[in-house]
Amino acid sequence: MTRSDITILTLNGKTPRIHESAFIAPGVRLIGDVEIGADVSIWYNCVLRADVSRIVIGARTNVQDGSVIHCDSPMPGAPDGYPTIIGEDVLIGHMAMIHGTRIEDRGFVGFAAQTMNGCVIEADGMLAAGALLAPNKRIPSRQLWSGRPATHMRDLDDRALAGLQLGVKHYVENAKVHKAALEAGADGAAQG
């Protein structure tokens, strides 16, 4: 991208790969081995730093404002390190910190929640706002975990999961609105 309000940095021979339909907001920093899928939205002032492993973001996932996503290097007991792999249709709330974690399709991470190396949030699993998922913990499918450290709070019913998917659809559409407004603003600035 050529916009000066976004950083896309090649590091260690790896350049971020961004699907043409993705929305990358101003202030975003994409560094190294990052892959962004179709209709993904990375919101204002997020940092995705894949300098020591990789980060993959699946289609229609959104990473909301101010979130930080990182990974970790190979180490004893983890010869491949800890990449961060995020599936499709995932919601990641504002100011979340995701580190060396796998989030499967339709997973959810609430506002200001944190995950650590080796964590897994299974499909349709949910980490509540402000929660801390300690290293190597796994949230099973259709469970909500909360607290610091996070523990199982309750199971999720079909209605709750349907609500999350409405959120995914909202973010895909809202990203198109923001992208168009930014493009219109850039055109207006260039003409004015």
Image (tube, helix red, strand yellow):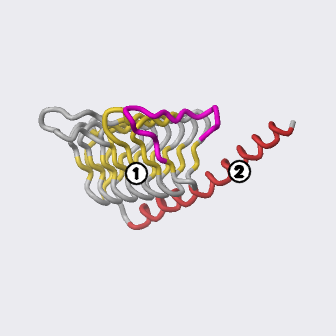
| Residue to which mark 2 is pinned | 180
Q: How many marks?
A: 2
Residue 148: x %, y % from top left = 30, 35
Q: Quarter-wise, where is residue 83 in the image?
A: top left
Q: Is residue 170 above or below residue 10?
A: below
Camera-side residue: 47 or 113? 47
Which amino acid lies under the numbered mark 1 shown in the image of this protein? Phe
Which one is closest to the eye, mark 2 or mark 1?
A: 2
Q: Residues within 10 Å of mark 1 (few under 14, many from 20)?
A: many
Residue 62 pos. (x, y %): 50, 49
* Closer to us: 115 or 148: 115
Taking the magenta stretch, the answer to whether it contains residue 15 is yes
Picture layout, residue 157 above or below residue 64: below
Estimate how packed mark 2 is, as few (under 14), some (14 to 19) or many (20 or more) residues with alpha carbons within 10 Å: few
Of all residues, the one furthest to the right in this rendering is: 192
Looking at the picture, how far across and down is residue 110, in whole percent? 43, 44
Query: Which residue range is magenta in the image?
Result: 1-17
Q: Are marks 2 and 1 in contact (CB under 8 Å)?
A: no
- Residue 170 drawn at (x, y percent): 58, 57
In the picture, the disc for residue 108 is 1
Query: Does 127 appear above or below 39?
Result: above
Q: 38 or 140, which is in the foreground?
A: 38
| Residue located at (54% from left, 56% from top) | 39
Residue pictured at 81% horizontal, 38% vertical: 190
The quadrant in which the C terminus is found is top right
The residue positioned farthest toward the left in the image shown: 77
Q: Is residue 41 left or right of residue 141?
A: right
| SS of the residue under disc 2 | helix
Distance of mark 2 from mark 1, alpha carbons? Answer: 27 Å
Residue 159 — which label?
none
